Image (cartoon, grey):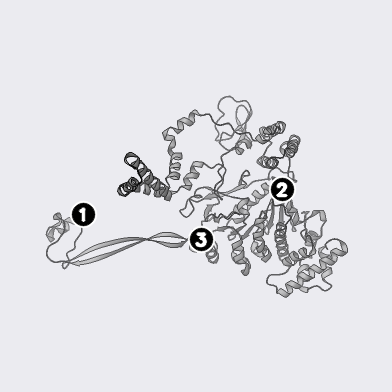
Amino acid sequence: MTTQGQAPAPGPLPPGWYADPAGHPQLRYWTGTKWTERTRPDVQAWVHGPRLVDVPGVFAYGRDPRQAAAARVGRESRQRALRYLMYAPLALVVLAVPAGIILTSIGLHGFPLWVVFIVLVLGACGWAGGWVPVGRVLWEQHGDRFGGAARRRKALPPPKPDMWRDLRSAGHVAAASRLDAAADHGELTDVDYVRVTRVIRQAQGDDDRLAAAAAEIEDAGAHAWLHASGQRDLPARLGEHDLMTGQVRLGVASRTGKNPATHAGQTFALDAEVLRTSLLVIGPPGSGKSRSFARPIVELLGLQTLTNMASVVVIDPRGDYALPGFFDVDIDPGNPESPWGFDLYGGARNPAEAADRLAGALLPPGVEPEADAAAHNALDAALSWFRERESRYPTLRELIAELDQGGPRLLVERLRLLDRPALVDLFDGPPDRRFSMREIDKPLRVRIALPEGAHPQAARILARLAVSQFVQTVSAPDVDRSIFKGLVVDDAGRFVDEYVVQGLQRARAANAGLILLAQSMREFPEDLRATVFANTGCKAVFAGIDPQDAAYIADFWGKQWVPETTVTTGQEHTTRSGTITGPPERRRSAQSLGRNTKRPGQLLALTGGSSVAHQRSVSTRPVERYVWSPSEIINEIPTGHALISLATADGFRTPPVLVDLRG
């Protein structure tokens, strides 16, 4: 079937794979007479495609350096450059005499004196006005008119670099040829390229290690170092990804005047580098924060898992992330066909560690300190005694039986919330099918569905246990920090406690990040709200948030100095007697005044011998204004948009950017 809207192939071509005539970054099969619907990724074009990595939050792939430079040099920069260009002649005139006296005193005379004087004045004006960056942008935009285009037309297009140059230069030609063949036949995906390239780069400088890598490539080709799932791509992609830079495209930054010039009109994206600082997402139901925002982030972490660079755990209260074939471990207590269970102790290394996390998840919020200490001590004693006796941790029902003999009643009753037929199998199932949180130290995709409909209290305990175990795992001193670990928590306010909040900072140092989604900041415990807000580097706000949240976020983004112009108008009354004064053409009788009111000049109204003069004054002063005020956050974020600010692990922060998630 011929694809509509595509031009025929130029000239007779044999059947084969060619660049898509529609301009998409892919290959399309040509039968010799027509184009077909058969396509495959053009990895070669993708690898060597244009990229510009400069500002966090901007999608690097496909960026035009000219447009990026123009964005960096905004309208204010151009106006400043033009202003100092106008100052230069005035400075030359005003400074000529004093500069001549000074330069003559140091021995300069005649032509050299004037050359030095002009260079100094123009250099000072150029430095103050920023002429160099503005001139560079203007040249890049309009230099073609001065012969640059003709020179480029004569030059041959540069050949595409070799994708496997490191292998060939080291003498492993057979391995490079095997990968070239896979790319030519459409067997090499972007996931394969990033996974294989990562291993090759890690082996640079070690001849033995590189030789072993080349041998693996010769044997397995594009399947080398395949993920344990055997997958080389996700079953489906909702978002647009660039695995070379580890970015996912979320939308387009609006061209509003409140957006920074570096982002306005640019494609907006997130990557693991900003997710390391953790992300707080606030938006009411139906605002799109799950499907339009969190789902592409889950896809990004899932793809990076397939490249053996990440792990991801998703806490799913409502089934928004139930994607068939997407996860390696899909824990769903409400699905009797789900084979996976959950380790109650998360692979804890000692009973004290296990007791600490289990007690924190079991106890309700606001429990008295005495009851909290009693629960921790009772769990520690029960687990220590049982492990010493049995060389393992107890099952759920065994733990209840141990605590029934004298443990705190509150702790026993909370444990009994998990003693339900569907949940007992979850916690006490076969050990080889029981997920332990310590397994995320290797590339793994995990989804934990919560049985909120049938067991709401037990669902909350399970979520709090999973979240705290994640923080405990990534904070361990022996964790593998070469793998990014991401945790996505929907309705996070109900599942976050003090231990998790304190772990947000530790996660950043351990190459991990938490993505916390909530409908309002009021969902978080009151004593933790400020800490949650402060410890999450990235913020995203959706349309429809309440005024309290808007005030909280406006204060966080702070204020800035802006010029405020005040215009004052008024009237001045003057009493006159005798004749009308004014220019000669206006010295007429009162009877002719009505015929000349449209002539230029001051209009004098003869009413009892008085005149009226209108006055207007303009003043400008700097004032402090919110970057985004609470009312603007409430009223000026359109549906389908989000207001996002980012931070990197080295302390760089971007101003809030209004992003159209449907763009």
Instruction: Tell me: residue 170, above or below residue 587.
Output: above
Left or right of residue 86: residue 279: right
Label 3 sits on what residue type?
A: Ile
Task: Tell me the quadrant of the picture where the N terminus can be found.
Answer: top right
In the rendered structure, which disc, 2 or 3, sits on the residue that comes first in sequence? Answer: 2
- Mark 1 touching mark 2, by CB under 8 A? no
- Quadrant housing residue 430: bottom right
Camera-nearest residue between 426 and 97: 97
Q: Estimate how packed mark 1 is, as few (under 14), some (14 to 19) or many (20 or more) residues with alpha carbons within 10 Å.
A: few
Q: Quadrant of residue 187?
A: top right
Instruction: Report whether 424 appears left or right of 366.
Output: right
Is 359 above or below relative to 506? Answer: below
Gap between marks 2 and 3, in whole Å? 39 Å
Q: Which residue is mark 3?
A: 633
**Disc 2 marks which residue?**
325
Residue 378 can be seen in this image: yes
Badge 3 marks a residue whose secondary structure is helix
Residue 662 position in % (x across, y down): 55, 50
Q: Nearer the viewer, mark 1 or mark 2?
A: 1
Q: 229 or 52, which lies in front? A: 52
- Whether residue 412 sits left or right of residue 662 in the image: it is right
Contact check, label 2 and label 3, Cβ < 8 Å: no
- Three-letter residue code for mark 2: Gly
- Marker count (numbered): 3
**Residue identifier under label 1:** 600
- Percent position (x, y) of residue 455? 73, 64
Ranked by sequence position, the earlier of labels 3 and 1 is 1
Q: Residue at x 37, y 49 (%)?
A: 83
Three-letter residue code for mark 1: Pro
From the viewer's perspective, tell me whether residue 428 is left or right of residue 71: right
Q: Secondary structure at mark 1?
A: loop
How far is disc 1 from disc 2 in space, using C-alphas? 81 Å
